[in-house]
Image (cartoon, rainbow, N blue to C red):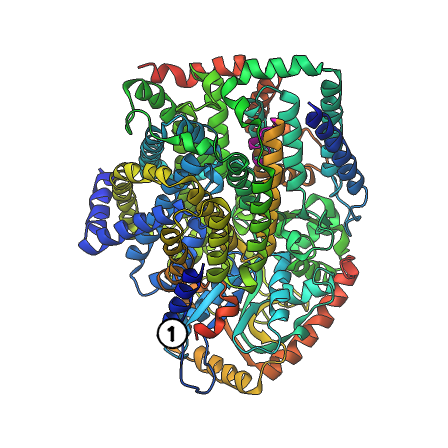
Amino acid sequence: MKAQRIASLTFTALAIAYLAGAFFIKEPPLRQQLGPDAFPKTIGVMMLVLSLLYVRIEFQRQPVKEDDERAAIIGAEEKLSDYVDYKTIGIMLALMLGYGLAFESLGYPLATFLMFMAGIYVLDLKHWKRDLIIAIIASFGIYFLFRYALRVNLPIGVLKFLFR
Amino acid sequence: MKRVLLFVVVLLSLVLSACGGAPASSYPEQPIEIIAPANPGGGWDTLARTIQVSLETEKMVSQPLSVTNKPGGGGGVGLAYMAAQKGTDYTLVVYSPPLVINNINGTFEGKSYKDLTPLAKLITDYQIIVVKADSPYQTLEDLLNAMRADPKAIKFAGVSSPGSMDHVAFAKIAKAAGIDPKQLEYIAFAGGGEATTALLGGNVTFLSTGIGESVAQLEAGTIRALAITAPERLTSDLLKDVPTVKESGYDVTYEIWRGVFGPADLSPEAKAYWEATLKKMVESPTWKAQLEKLNWRDAYSPSEEFTTFLGQETETYRALLTELGFAK
Amino acid sequence: MDIWNNIVLGFSVAVTPFNLFLAFVGVFLGTVIGVLPGIGPMTGIALLIPITFGLPPNSAIILMAGIYYGAMYGGSTTSILVNAPGESSSVVTCIDGFEMAKKGRAGPALAAAAIGSFIAGTFATIMLMILGPAIAQFALNFGPPEYFALMFAGLTVVTSLAGRSLVKALLATTIGLAISTIGIDLQSGVSRYTFGNLEMLDGLEFLVVAIGLFALSEVLANLADMRQAVMERLSIKGGLWLTKEDWKRAIPAFIRGTLSGFFVGGLAGAGAAVASFVSYGIEKSTGKHKEELGHGAIEGVAGPEAANNAAAGGAMIHLLCLGIPGSGTTAIMLGALLMLGLQPGPLLFQQQPDFVWGLIASMYIGNVMLLVLNLPLVGMWVKILDIPLYLLVLFIILFSFLGVYTVNNSVQDLLLMVGFGIIGYILRRLDIPAAPIILAMVLGDLMEQALRQSLIISDGSLGIFVTRPISLILLILAAISITNPYWGQLGAFFRRIFGQKTAA
């Protein structure tokens, strides 16, 4: 409920920013029937109207009623998933960002291997020996498969000296 | 975790012993990457892959070659990637006039061919002006007369935004014919297919495009060519009856060149190697056969000449784009 | 009898051991390529160009067509199993396909996708054979105004993607439209919302957004509570094969999907992604179980999967009969054919009959091979769901990154994808549907360009959209669907057209 209200206000801010951005689109060198700013301005206005409607809906609704309604519609099953393990999500998101950043600099095989092992460390370490072999296949194995079977050179990064 | 580490060390050393330890020899010592600064399927990509195929079939390069697509920003992403390879010797890239155009219109934010090492101009294509087979316009002059009478009545199509090759090529002709190029009604399409459909469907009056793009329809007789921008008539059966723009009385030519570049600060050794190899390649039977199939024309010129040519191109385009309002 | 002779000619070309082998290699590789997210038919064929170089043209195109169809089949697999669309045309399949998998019905979903692809692929091949040139000629009637009307009508499908709140669905639509305006504007050359970033000049890559919003947000939802995770409940309930009830519901959807997909892809020349969305809209408005759509209805897989294959077949008609590529993939095939010394176009049928008919014959063979290959694979694919959840999560991350990277070779795309993963997760918590964002992204750019091209053609008069018959009809269809958000009237209309033939 609170989240919905924050979201509706965020969308309104987004719509205003997008609409404002449309006014900064440069004039094209050649005049046209419809310039490059016409479509963005239309979308911006639509977005603004809709987000204001969203705001109105969320701020008029009674909190308690909303929750009952939700429970009635979704059922007990999905209510359980309201629990959020922010720590795991946060760590894994950081891991994904790190993986993306390291994809070219460390190279695909090393970055993938490290991401995989870190993921296993965070999520479940029980079968680490089996998972280590899987990680090697998923990183170095796929690299070789792409390189020699598909002839795609995935980035090799710091391991460049290995593959002359 | 100790065992993990040990395992990794063993694995890495295995990989090392299998793949490493190549004896030191002269250039090239590493695989070569050819950058196509656009998506698969377009002119740049086809050229990059044709070079790859020719060099491999003729076994001219001892190292493996691969083509990597770096699309984006009208070739700007590829150019930025090449800038990061400055001083290395194993990355080549292919470009055509947008390399010059996008420098002048500001897309490349100051970067130009000067941030690359021009190695060779390889091929060229010319611009062709085509109308639908049943169009009332029989000659380029007919078309230009209609435009003089009412410039808004004639719409023409081309690929990519105003200020790009298809638009500028015709603007050059229009200007020589005394028509204000800013008055032209140009409609941009995302690809040659869409533009051709628009012409065949009668939605536009004519199409300004590369010859290569129009061969299928010309052969089938669904479209008719009014003029080409070559300095003289072409010799092929299909095109030998198409007059040049010059014949129509306007001293205009327009060339769509395509060439190969290395990164800036390419070592003299690598530069000499590629100059020699590319020269050998354009004389090889595989390359010649490919040109025939793809309807490309050989326009080989070596590094030095190519660099001078790029300087002239920059001047020509700057004048044209300034007049149209696209120069930055 | 002419056609008969040609078919015999075609099969004599296609049924040599070597060409059969290549067709098999093609469909097999294509399936693998399709299953990997990101590495779609475009990249697959581009990779093959050096390999096809030494082959005779007949064999080369048989290999490439195999890849093309195989990738169209394979694209749905990861959509259904892990909510990761392999290509743009299988995004819609995620909606009901993944819901079916969550209910333990991944087997029937995969089987329905394969059968739908087979029916549509075969239908499109037959149409290519008997009506190819006529269809290609008719397709020329679709100029910018018709395109605009078609995209506008397609956008009304968004109402069928709405969950409980129409406002939220429409808001999502405007976000998708806003994303589609990022980059250099084709009609003017002016850059919009790029903030000086070079890679943004070409706009946001479709797969970056789709994989972020669907696959990575699913990953995050699972990480949010590993004990209760959705994927844990995927274990198969019931058979892998379609039940009698499934067949009864899927067959009409196959037929509707095939026809509408062929219309969108073959006649109008719009892509397979648009075709799949339109088909979903039709299912949502006509089916007997339309209220189930979005919660794992088999029609939601059968229709769109048939539609995207019918559209892919339609694109082949444009390539072979007009020499005009109707999609990114056929554009690459055109380039590859040129490199092989063949010029697709109106004359190809006369000048190279053995080539064209050999290809057509191999398309039949390839479709049969794909069906035979894919149905047993269903059993193997569903086993993926038995992989421990934490490993499955890591593999989805790995393949999402790998796939998105191979599209543009760009690290920025990877970071954007993670960003869209976060956005997708937040939207999910807020109960805002992600599918309209994708739909609007696919249609928005095409719609805007077509609108502005039309207005240049008409010197600014909007009359162009109502004076041209095809455009007018499409706009009337759009108007009906807008005025009635529950598609009642339009539903009845489509039932009249499609329903009676299929009332089995």
Q: Report the magenta residues as a range.
A: C431-438
**How busy is the neighbourhood of tag 1: few (under 14 within 10 Å), some, or many (20 plus)?**
few
Where residue C259 sits in the image (x, y, percent)? 40, 28
Q: Is residue B143 left or right of residue B64?
A: right
Q: How many marks?
A: 1
Residue B239 visible in the picture: no
Residue C418 visible in the picture: yes
Q: Quadrant of the N terminus of chain C?
A: top left
- Reply above or below: A136 against A59: below
Q: Quadrant of the C terminus of chain C?
A: top left
Where residue B182 sits in the image (x, y, percent)? 76, 53
At 66% from the left and 22% from the top, the residue drawn is C167
Front residue of C69 and A81: A81
Where residue C95 sits in the image (x, y, percent)? 48, 30
Picture quarter containing residue C340? bottom left
Picture quarter containing residue A59? top right
Tell me which amino acid carries mark 1. Cys
- Reply above or below: A149 against C183: below
Q: Is residue A142 left or right of residue C239?
A: right
Which residue lies under the disc numbered 1? Answer: B19
Front residue of C482 and A74: A74
Q: Is C191 a magenta residue?
A: no
Front residue of C273 and C364: C273
Q: SS of the residue at dot 1?
A: helix
Q: Is C433 a magenta residue?
A: yes
At 55% from the left and 35% from the top, the residue drawn is C224
- Reply above or below: C452 against B56: above
Where residue C214 sits in the image (x, y, percent)? 52, 37
Q: Chain of mark 1?
A: B
